[in-house]
Image: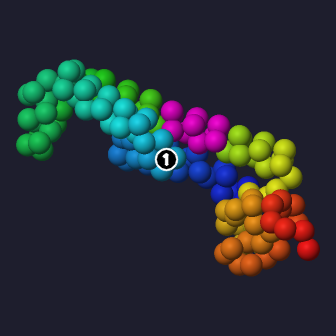
Amino acid sequence: MNETRSRLRPWFAALLALTVTGLGHAYLRRWLRALGWFAATYAAVLLFVPDAALAAMVGGDSVDLSTLAPPLVVVLSSAVDAFVLARADETAAARRAAADGAPTTCPRCGNDVDPELDFCHWCTAELDGARGGDER
C-alpha cells in the first residue's frame, strides 16, 4: 500500500497543477513556488494573450489555440515541475528512512507515522525500527 501511495503522489501533484496552476505545489507545501507559478501564468495571460481573445473566451466564442499557447506552456511547465518535485521528495524521504532505519509509514495501516514514536498513532501498531523514546 505504501508503494502505491508513493507512486500516486507525483501524479496527483501534477494533476492538481494542471487543474489550477500552483495547486500542485501547494499540495507539496511549496508555498512560494505555488505563488510564483500562479503569478507566471497570470503574467503570461496579461502579456501574450490579446484582449480580443480574452473577450471571445468570456463571450463563449471560439478562440484560436495559438493565441493561448504562452499560458498553456506555463501551465504544463508547472505540472512537470510539481511532478519532478514530488518524485524528488519521495526519493529523499525513502533515503532518509533507509538511513535512519525507522519506518515513515505504518506497515499495518499505511499512514504516515512520526519516526520518534515506537507505535503508529493511527492504528497503535508497534513499529520495530522506530527510534527515540525511552528504552523499556
Residue occupied by mark 1: 29
The residue sitting at 20% across, 21% down in the picture is 47
Q: Nearer the viewer, residue 63 or 69?
A: 69
* Picture layout, residue 64 above or below residue 118: above
Image quadrant occupied by the N terminus: bottom right
Give the x, y percent position of residue 114: 70, 62
Residue occupying image coordinates x 75% and y 59%: 115
| Majority secondary structure in the magenta region | helix
Residues 125 and 81: in front is 125
Q: Position of residue 14 (x, y in %)?
A: 50, 43
Q: Residue at x 44, y 47 (%)?
A: 26
Colouring method of the image? rainbow
Q: Is residue 8 magenta?
A: no
Q: Secondary structure at mark 1?
A: loop
**Quick one: quadrant of the C terminus?**
bottom right
Q: Amino acid at mark 1?
A: Arg
Q: Is residue 14 left or right of residue 112?
A: left
Which range of residues does the magenta coloring cover?
Answer: 80-89
